[in-house]
Amino acid sequence: MLNTFIGDAGHLSVILAFVAATVAAYSYFMASKGRALGDTDAGWLRLARGAFFVHSAAVVAIILCLFNIIYEHRYEYYYAWSHSSNHLPVHYMISCFWEGQEGSFLLWIFWHVVIGLAIMRFNRKWEAPVMAVFSFVQLFLTSMILGVVIFNVKIGSSPFILLRDFLTDLPVFKLNPNFVPKDGTGLNALLQNYWMVIHPPTLFLGFALTLVPFAFAIAGLWKRELTTWVKPALPWSLFGGLILGVGIVMGAYWAYETLNFGGYWNWDPVENAVYSPWLVLVASVHGLVLWQRSRTALRTSFVLVIATFLLILYATFLTRSGVLGNASVHSFTDLGLSGQLLIYLGAFVVLAIGLLVSRWKDIPVSEKELTTYSPELWVFIGATVLCLGAFQVLFTTSIPVYNAFLGFIGIKSNLALPADQIAHYTKIQLWMGVFVAFLSGLAQIMWWQRNDKETLTNSLTVPGILTLLGAALVILLVRYNKLTMSPAYIALLTTALFGVLANLGMIFTLLKRRVALSGGAVAHVGIALMLLGILASAGYSNIISKNVSGMVYSKEFTEELNRDNVLLWRNEMAPMDGYDISYTGQYFDVPGVPEYVNKEVLFRTDDEYKALARSDIKFGDKLYYKAGDTVEILPENTYYRVEYKDRKSGEAFTLYPRAQVNEEMGGLLASPDIKKFLGHDIYSHISSVPDPSKEKDWSEVKEHVLSVGDTIYLNDYFAVFRNVEPAHETAGLGLTKGDIAIQADFVVSGEKKQYHVHPVFVVRNRLIGRVPDEVEDLGLRLSFVNVDPTNKKFTFGVSTTQKDYIILKATEKPFINLLWSGTLLMALGFGMAIAKHRREARRAPQAATPVVKKPRVSRQPAPIA
C-alpha cells in the first residue's frame, strides 16, 4: 500500500521553504534599502524574520519527512529504494540521508538555517543586509530540491518522487501501479563506514560557513561599510577554516581506512574541488588578520573572501553537473540541474564582482610601505602562495569544463587530464608546501617583535641551526637505510622542521612573557607536522609484501599484483619482510557480538542475513548465542583473518581486512585493516580471493564404507568417524512429521586444529536427499551417501578441491601519525584564535563606551603640578 502522505507533506514543505526564503530575501532587502547600517524599516524587518522562521521550520519538516521515508523503509519512494535497505543499522540510515544529491543539498540548507538563526541572534546590527544575502542563497539552494515543472522546464529534483514515477518504463508498474519493492538497493558498501556518518555533515558545515564572511563582505560593499565588516567576519572565517579543514582530513582518513589505493589523498577532482576553496579561505583569514592589525590588504581580503564562496559554488557545479564524467570516482551524476547550477553560480558572480568593481576605488588602501622587515609582507606572500596552489589544482581539475564549454560553442577540444595526475599535482603542491612551511615560521617570528637586521638574525639563529642539524640527521638516517632523498624532499623536510621549531620557539617565548598563546603559532606547528607526515608516509611507504616465491600467481594478474603481493594458503605460515604471517579463515560481522565470528560456526540459510549457530558463540566468559540459535549477520563483507608475528620481538597481532565481490562495482571491493604503531602503520588489504560466484572444481568423489570408530586418511589429514545421530530441526532442514534425517559426526585433524564435520542423510516422502558438509580450511567435502542398517555400515563420499587462499598486499607507512596529530594541532590553533577574537569582541564595547563621571567637588586644595 502506497503511503503518499509523507511524500506530499515533504514536497509541500519544500515549496513552503522556497516561498518563505523568497519572501525573507525580499523583505530583508527592503528593510535595509536606502538606510544606514543598523537602521532598518521595522515592518519589513518583522516580516523578514517571520519568513525566515517559517523557512527554518519548513526545512526541519523536510528533513523529518525524508528521514521517515528512509527509516520506515518506504520503498515506494525512489530515494529510499535507491539508497537504503532493510538491514542497514540506524547510523548508516543517516548516511543514506546525504548519499544522494537532494539529501546533501538539504544538509547544506539546514546548516545555513542554523547559522542564519545565530546571526539573527548575535549580529543584530548587521542582520538585515547579511540575512538578505543569506536568504537569497537559501532561495537558490531550496530551488535545487523543488522538483516542479513549469512550462516544460524542470526546477530542482525532489527527494520525494515515487519510484513508479522515476522508473516509469518498468513493466511491473504497468501491471501494478501500487507495487512496492520488499527491499531497497542498499547503501554503497564503501560508504558503510562511521566516517561517512560524520564527515559529510562536517564538510557541509564548512561549506555553509564560507557564506558568512561572504555575506558580511557583500553587506559591507552594499552599505559602504568598507572596513567595519572585517571584525564580525573574521571569527566566522576562522571557524570556517577550522571546520572545512577538519572535514577535508576526515575524508582523507575515510579514504585511508576504506579504500585500497594505499593512501589518503588521490587528487580526485572531487577532492580537489573542496581543497582549493579551503586554501583560498585560509589565505583570506590571513588577509583579514592583516587588516585588523596593520590596516593593510583590505582589497585583498575582499577579493579572497568573495572568491572562497564563489569557489564553493563552482565546486558544487563541478561535482553535481555531471561535467566530470569519468574523471572522478565519486562525483554525482547529472540530474538535469546543470543549467540551474550555472544560473546559481552566475547570479552570485555577477552580484559579487559587480558590487566589488563599483566600490573598488572607495576601499581604503594602506599608505604604509612594506619593507623586507615587515611581517605583513611575508604574511601577504604566504597568502599569495596558497592562492597560487589553489589555482594550479583548480586549473587542471577544470579541463573537462573547458572541453564541455568549447564543445557547446562548436569547437572540438582535445584537452586531456594528465596521464599521471598524482605526479602532476604533487610536483607543484610539494613546492607550495615548502614555501608555506618556511613562511609560517618566518612570519610568526617577525609578527611578535620589532624587526631589523640584527633582531631578525638573532631570532632566526637558534631555530635555523636546530633545523639544519635535524634535517642533516634525518638525511643521514635515510641514506643509512639505503633510501634516496630528492632535492625537493630535502627542501620540504628542512622547511617543515623550521616551521615546527620556529613556531614552537615563539610559543615558549610568549609563555615566558605571560602573553596569551598565539593560535596562529599552534596552527602553524600543526600544518608543518602535517607536511612532515605527508612527506614520510607518502614519500617513503614501504611495500613489505614483495613476492619472494619466484612464481607468478597468475598470467591474468598485472605485473604489480604479481610483484607486490604475498600468496597465503589458509593456515599455512609464510615469511613477509620481518614477519611470519598466516591466513586463518573467513569471518562475518554479527551485530551485538564484539568480535567477528568465524564462518565455520555459522550455517547459512535461505535468508542471506540469517544463519544458524553450529556451536556456542562466546567471547571471554560471555555467551552470545547457543548452538542452534538464529544469528543475524551482515553478509556484504567477508573479513579475512590474518595473523602477524614479528620474528625479532615475537610480538603478534591480528588484522581483519575485508572484501566483497561486487561485479556491479568493478569486481573485488577491498578495504584495509591497519595496525597502528607509534612510528608507523602496517596497512594491509586483500588484492585477490577465489571468486565465490564460481563453482569450486571438486575432484571425483571417492567412496568409503565405514563403521563407527573407523579412521580414514584424506590427503594429508585423517578423520575419525565417531557416531551417527539424529539431525536437529535447527540444522535448517525444515523437517516434517514422517521425515527422517541423520547426520554423521566426523573429527578431522588438520595442521593446527580439529574440525567437526556433519554430513546429513535425509529421507523425505520416500526420496533420499544428501546435505554435504565442507571444511574450507582443508579443501574437503564429505557426503553421507548410503546406510546399510543390517551390517551397520555407512557409505561416505569424499572429494577435494584447491585450498582456500588470499593474495595480500601490506605496506608500512612511516610517521603517518604526524599527519593526524598535526591536524588536531591545526584545529586547536584555529579554535584558540576564535576564542581570542571572542574575548576581544566582548571587551571592545566596554572600551568603546567610556564611562562619564560627574566632577566631584573637593574641599581640599588642588595639588600643584
Image (cartoon, rainbow, N blue to C red):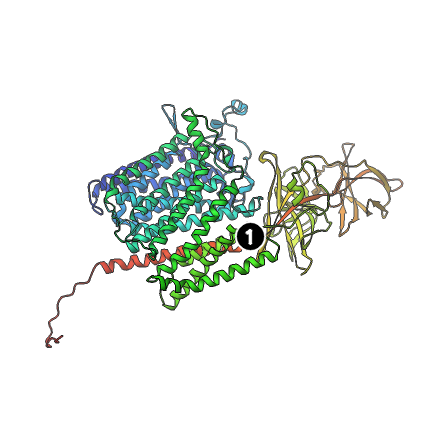
Residue at image coords 61%, 56%: 481
Counting from the top left corner in percent of width and height, residue 536 is at 54, 53
Can I make out residue 5 in this image?
yes
Residue at image coords 53%, 45%: 255
Counting from the top left corner in percent of width and height, residue 359 is at 25, 42
Q: In this rendering, is residue 62 above or below 469?
A: above
Residue under label 1, please give it. Answer: 485
Instruction: For mark 1, give the secondary structure.
Output: loop
Residue at image coords 37%, 34%: 143
Task: Determine the residue located farthest toward the right in the rendered image.
Answer: 791
Instruction: Describe residue 722's horizontal placement relative to residue 638 as left or right.
Output: right
Image quadrant where one finds the C terminus: bottom left
Q: In this rendering, is residue 859 above or below 343?
A: below
Label 1 sits on what residue type? Met
Counting from the top left corner in percent of width and height, residue 254 is at 52, 47
Which sits in the foreground, 376 or 852? 376
Instruction: Describe residue 108's horizontal placement relative to residue 814 as left or right.
Output: left
Instruction: Describe residue 111's horizontal placement relative to residue 266 as left or right.
Output: left
Counting from the top left corner in percent of width and height, residue 65 is at 43, 38
Residue 461 occupies which quadrant of the picture?
A: bottom left
